[in-house]
Image: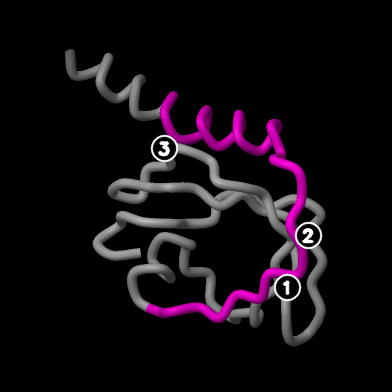
Amino acid sequence: MINGCGKIYYGKKNYICDEKREKFDTTEWVAVVWLPLYPIGSYTIAREKREDTISAMARSMIWSEKIIIEGKRPLDKEQVIRTYLKTYIPIALILLLFK
């Protein structure tokens, strides 16, 4: 991802965490300015667990995370719909407030 444009993962489902890593199902998206535009596919991924609580957006801007794709899954339509709703409803409300 360069300047918020490219591929990004959104969503966490079936989250499992141990002392060193976390594993979950997520959806990969084509994003522009960190806004998800089009879902590419859903995957089960694992990554090193971080002790801090920095958001995924901040992590993607600061660190290059090592993500291990453990398996491809059918596109998770529920996760896609939730991602669209969580992203675009707040934007629409903000735009309506300042109209």
The quadrant holding residue 43 is: bottom right
Q: CA distance from mark 2 to mark 1?
A: 7 Å
Please report the residue visible at 73 percent of the width from the left and 86 percent of the height from the top.
20
User: Circles 3 and 1: CB distance less than 8 Å?
Assistant: no
The structure residue drawn at horizontal position 70% and vertical position 73%, both measured from the top left corner, is 46
Residue picked out by circle 2: 15
Q: Is residue 67 left or right of residue 96?
A: right
Residue that badge 3 annotates? 37
Residue 70 magenta? yes
Query: Which of the numbered marks, if any, corresponds to residue 47?
Result: none
Classify residue 9 by image quadrant. Answer: bottom right
Disc 2 marks a residue whose amino acid type is Tyr
| Tags 2 and 1 touching, CB below 8 Å | yes
Above or below, 86 relative to 26: above
Q: Amino acid at mark 1?
A: Glu
The image quadrant where one finds the N terminus is bottom left
Dot 3 or dot 1: first in sequence order is 1
- Is 3 left, or right, of 44 in this rendering? left
> SS class of the residue under badge 1?
strand
Q: Which residues are magenta?
A: 63-89
Of the image marks 2 and 1, the number of the one nearer the N terminus: 2
Q: Is residue 41 magenta?
A: no
